[in-house]
Amino acid sequence: MQNFDWAYFVLAILPILLAITLSEAACGYMARFCGDRTAETMGRLSLNPAKYIDIVGTIIIPIFTMIVLQGYLMVGWAKPVPIDPRNFRNRRKGERLVAIASPLANLLMCLCWAVVMIISQWVPEYFQKPMALMGLMGIRFNAVFCFFSLLPIPPQPGAQFIDSFLSPRASMQYRKLAPYGTWIILFLIISGLLMFILQPFINLVTSLMLFIVSLF
C-alpha cells in the first residue's frame, strides 16, 4: 500500500463505501433494538450505503487522506443516523450499545473481507489478484475505522462508550472536551501521531485475518 495509483483507488471504492456507511447503519439498527425508532420513522434506516453517503466525509476526505498518506491511512465519516437517546428503554445501556455497534460492525466486515480473500482462490485466474487485493483493502480499511472510532475523543463512539460509564459529574467534565475534539483529531492526523497510535492495532487485526485466510 506504499504507492498510490488509480487502479488501487478503483478497487478501494467499494471497501471504503461499505466500511464507512454500514458501520453507521449498524448504529441505527442497534438504536432500534434499544427502543429508538427515530431513524426508521424518518426513512433513514437501511442497509443501502447510498442512504449514508456524505459528500465531504464519505468521498472527499477519504480520497484526500488516501492520496496524501499514500494508502497508509484513510479516514472519513458517513451521514449520521438520527438517534434520540430519550427513547431508549435503558438510556445508559442504549448509548453504550449504540456507541460500540460501529466498531463491532467494522470488525465483522474485516471477517467478511477475509472470506472474500479466501473465495478469490477459486475464481478465474484473471480475477484472483484484484479480488484478493480488494479483500485486503477491505480488511485494512475496516480495521482503521474500527480503531479510529474507538478513540476516546469526542465525538468519536469510543468517547460516547466511555461516557456511558461515568457518573453525571465526571460525564459533565468529560464532555467539556467535545468542542476541541475535532481539532485534536485533525492535529493527530496532520502530525502523524494518529498513525503511530492506530498502526499496532491495525496490524494485529490484519495479521489475524490473513492467518485465517492462510488456513484455507
Image (tube, rainbow, N blue to C red):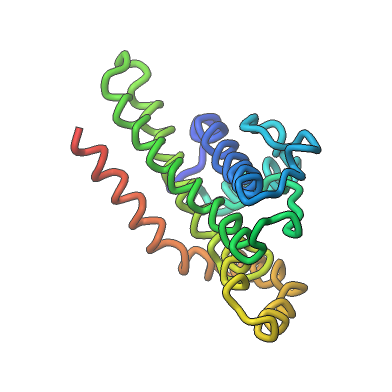
Q: Is residue 116 visible?
A: yes
The answer to whether 63 appears left or right of 108 in the picture is right
Q: Is residue 172 above or below residue 186?
A: below
As drawn, which residue projects farthest toward the left? 215
Residues 74 and 162: in front is 162
Q: Is residue 64 visible?
A: no
Residue drawn at (62%, 41%), measured in percent from left and top? 25
The answer to whether 191 appears left or right of 120 in the picture is right
Q: Give percent across and percent down for residue 83.
A: 74, 51
As drawn, which residue projects farthest toward the top? 124
Residue drawn at (66%, 56%), measured in percent from left and top? 89
Question: Looking at the rendering, which quadrant does residue 181 occupy?
Answer: bottom right
Residue drawn at (64%, 29%), measured in percent from left and top? 48
Residues 193 and 6: in front is 193
Residues 123 and 155: in front is 155
Q: Give percent across and percent down for residue 13.
A: 57, 33
Labels in figure, total? 0
Q: Give percent across and percent down for residue 169.
A: 69, 86
As drawn, which residue projects farthest toward the right? 42
The answer to whether 8 appears left or right of 77 in the picture is left
Q: Quadrant of the C terminus?
A: top left
The answer to whether 26 appears left or right of 8 in the picture is right
Residue drawn at (76%, 48%), measured in percent from left and top? 82
Q: Quadrant of the N terminus?
A: top left
Q: Is residue 185 above or below residue 109?
A: below
Residues 210 and 47: in front is 47
Q: Is residue 47 above or below residue 141?
A: above
